[in-house]
Amino acid sequence: MGDLHVMRDDLRPPDPPARRHLISITDLTREDVERLLGTARSFERSLEREMKKLPTLRGRLVVNVFYESSTRTSSSFELAAKRLSADTMSIKASGSAVDKGESLKDTAITLGAYDPDVIVLRHPHIGAPQLVARVTEARIVNAGDGKHQHPTQALLDLYTIQESFGRIEGLHVAIVGDILHSRVARSNIQALALLGARVTLVGPPPLLPRGIEAMGCETTTDIEAIGAADVVYILRMQQERMQEGANYVPSLREYTARWGVTPERLRPGQKVMHPGPMNRGVEIDPRVADAGDALIETQVRAGLVVRMAVLYDLLTTGPAAVKAELPVKVA
Ligand code: NCD
């Protein structure tokens, strides 16, 4: 009898892997990040072949839902899913039932009826990805929630730095500009700290959130500080997220004069990054944007392979798939 019990246990199918999401960089361990970057690298090699499509996610459905404008992020998620042979649908808030007043919850339930494997969501409100995770069975990838998180942007930035320097550990990255409204800054500070890089935030005092040092970075208002960094990471003034009537800087002209990144403020050999969209002549001098040391186009290319890696990782039983469901956190 005892033996039979053992046999029955053996024959029981393994528990399905827990549903995982990528909502915040804090969902990931260093090991997870390293695995994702390694997967992205192998996808990059596979894209060098003439036949660019892999059969890996055939029959899977990836739905992109974007409640804010986007060029890079939405196009790269769509292409990433297509390169892995998944079916894709892209919904933009404008022109959808959202215009008719449908709530995020009802939109998510509607899309959930198609049984998507992954929902990629960009939304102006912090916590929107957790809401969609609660009302659907899909894995959720946060493509930006308000000023909170944009984890795939940070991963593609890590990938770009790793490919350019051969390492991340020990490098010094200066992030310059509107930190206060930037989910890219928050995700990057955590991701860079996780991999052992040093981060200095540079910007006007009202745009450097108080207490942000607790995330593992230094702050300064002195633009000269960028001279000490290996990478200068430039952010846009995100006016659409600024409170009406709030005067963060006297004027954009003043901002450019004091914090704009110009060739004169850089050292030869320093690498420059920007998540896009760029406002040339405001936060970045056009000569900096077009110089050989700018990695801005490399970042866009990295976005494709890194997003392929994220979709693949969430949908296959990789080493992390046996991990318990990741806790949901809102900062
Ligand atoms: C960023 C974003 O949306 O947060 N852009 C992007 O994803 N490429 C940064 C920005 O909008 O300035």
Image (cartoon, grey):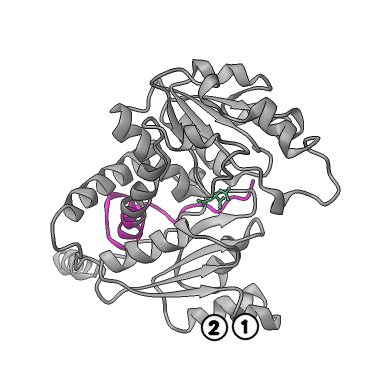
Using residue 287 as the reference point, say whether residue 45 is left or right of it. Answer: left
Q: Residue at x 57, y 62 (%)?
A: 69
The CB of the residue at mark 1 lies under 8 Å from ligand 1: no
- Magenta stretch bounds: 308-331
Label 2 is placed on what type of residue? Thr
x and y percentages locating residue 44 in the rendered image:
23, 49
Figure check: 38 above or below 71: above
Q: Secondary structure at mark 1?
A: helix
Pointer 1 with pointer 2, Cβ within 8 A: yes
Q: Quadrant of residue 144?
A: bottom right
| Mark nearer the viewer, 1 or 2 | 1
Q: Quadrant of the C terminus?
A: top right
Disc 2, SS: helix
- What residue is rendered at 62% in x and 44% in y? 182
Vertical placement of residue 174 versus 6, above or below: above
Q: Which residue is mark 1?
A: 97
Is residue 314 one of those drawn in magenta? Answer: yes
- Pointer 1: residues within 10 angstroms few (<14), some, or many (20+)? some
Name the residue rendered at 48%, 84% in the picture: 113
For disc 2, the neighbor class at 10 Å (few under 14, some 14 to 19, many from 20) is: few
Left or right: residue 247 versus residue 310 is right
Question: Is residue 12 visible from the viewing direction of this image?
Answer: yes
Q: Is residue 129 magenta?
A: no
Q: Is residue 270 left or right of residue 50?
A: right
Q: Residue 102: horizontal and vertical position, in percent?
A: 67, 80
Above or below, comparing residue 239 to residue 206 in the picture: below
Q: Position of residue 154 (x, y in %)?
A: 46, 43
- What amino acid is found at the position of numbered circle 1 in the picture? Ala
What is the x, y in percent for residue 266? 50, 21
Q: Quadrant of the N terminus?
A: bottom left
Q: Is residue 258 left or right of residue 29?
A: right
Label drawn at residue 110: 2
